[in-house]
Amino acid sequence: MLLFEWHEFVLTALACVICAAVVLLRSRFPRLSGRTDDLSAVQSMHTRLTPRVGGIAIFGALGLSVMFAPVSISGPYANFIMATAVLFVVGLAEDLGFHMSPRRRMLAVIGASLLAIWLLGVWLPRTGIPGLDQLVNHWAIGIPLTLLLTAGIANGFNLIDGVNGLASMTALAAAIALSLIAEHAGYAVMVHLAMMVAAGIFGFLLVNYPFGLIFLGDAGAYTIGFVLSWFGIAVLLNAPDVSPWAILLTLYWPMADTVLAIYRRSRRNADVSAPDRLHVHQMVMRALEICILGRNRRHIANPLTTLVLLPFVIAPPIAGVLLWNQNQNAFLAVVAFGVLFFASYAAAPGLIRRFRR
């Protein structure tokens, strides 16, 4: 049974204090809120400039967690945090108003993963797909696939970071699910590491939700996605009974949103990295404003969107925990959630238009 230990309370408190300090200092240091044109950005879902450097709290908790990591992996874990720092610095530069293009940020994710592979000497060990599992052991297949997955998940968390609490609650559910799967599989090290990450995320969430006093920003969203994707790889490396599809279920929502965004933009012949206002959380928030609350209630619609989506966000991680060692059933669950996700998205505009009529 998972319980917070004393050092996890310390990490929660540290992240919470850092976030509170940033909120208090935002008027003295305007750069903490990024660029003044953020409110007019295509994907913007908020109405006032808000500190975007919640990633400092996340990375601060990660850095301190090295001191509490099991002695057996303290060295490799410190190396992993060092690789993560590459991505964090690039994301933080964007959050502080120094323009970092989506391509640069994606290159930072790839660079951080390559550094992790070099320092740790590991990559994705298996996929749960017959035939492919024999190929991923070779670096020419395994490393590119690892880069694709870690970049996709890191970017996915950035894509869903659009309304208060959604990305952090998704990450919290994923971290706890990974910890539970590790506990079922007897991989005690990951039980503690994942719970320490969950503790840091929870400290940020206490200040972020529901009023949105601080945002994760690119540094926070990319860092969380990167760390959790590599934690999933670590579970597969050290717990041979765990299904890769169960790990995918723990990170389902950001992956599904990424695939949907690529498909949606490709159909319009648009740049796949170009922002838009057609993510699931954006459509749900507009539906709440149009159908229920009214257009002048965004301060309510924003956090309410997270509550509406939360059951759908946490259902796949719960399935991943229940099916942690059932590869075929976990795969079928991924397919089922995929059908529901894309069918619901396709049906939503018609339902909204019918309600308006």
Image (cartoon, rainbow, N blue to C red):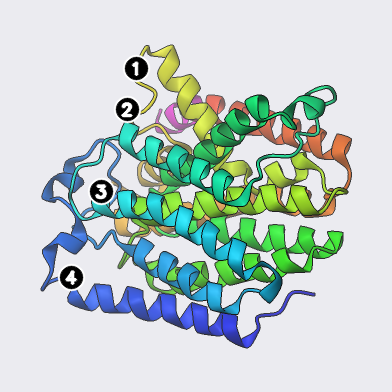
Which marked residue is nearer to the observer: mark 1 or mark 3?
3
3 vs 2, front mark: 3
Of label 3 and label 2, which has the lower sequence position?
Answer: 3
Task: Single out the residue that lies furthest toward the bottom.
Answer: 6
Residue, disc 2: 274
Query: Which residue lies under the disc numbered 1?
Result: 270
Cβ–Cβ below 8 Å for labels 1 and 3?
A: no
Q: Earlier in the sequence, mark 4 or mark 3?
A: 4
The residue under label 1 is which amino acid type? Ala
Residue 169 visible from this viewpoint: no
Please name the residue shown 30% across and 62% down the image.
53
Task: Report the Cα–Cα distance between label 1 and label 3.
Answer: 23 Å
Dot 4 alpha-carbon crowd within 10 angstroms: few under 14, some 14 to 19, many 20 or more: some
- Residue at mark 3 to residue at mark 2: CA–CA distance: 16 Å
Helix, strand or loop: magenta stretch: helix
Instruction: Measure how far apart labels 2 and 4 are at the Cα level.
Output: 29 Å
Q: Quadrant of residue 187?
A: bottom right
Q: Secondary structure at mark 3?
A: helix
Which mark identifies residue 26?
A: 4
Tell how many labels: 4
- Rounded to the nearest whole Å, what is the CA distance between mark 1 and mark 4? 36 Å
78 in the magenta segment: no
- Is 115 situated above or below 339? below
The 10 Å Cα crowd at callout 2, few under 14, some 14 to 19, many 20 or more, is few
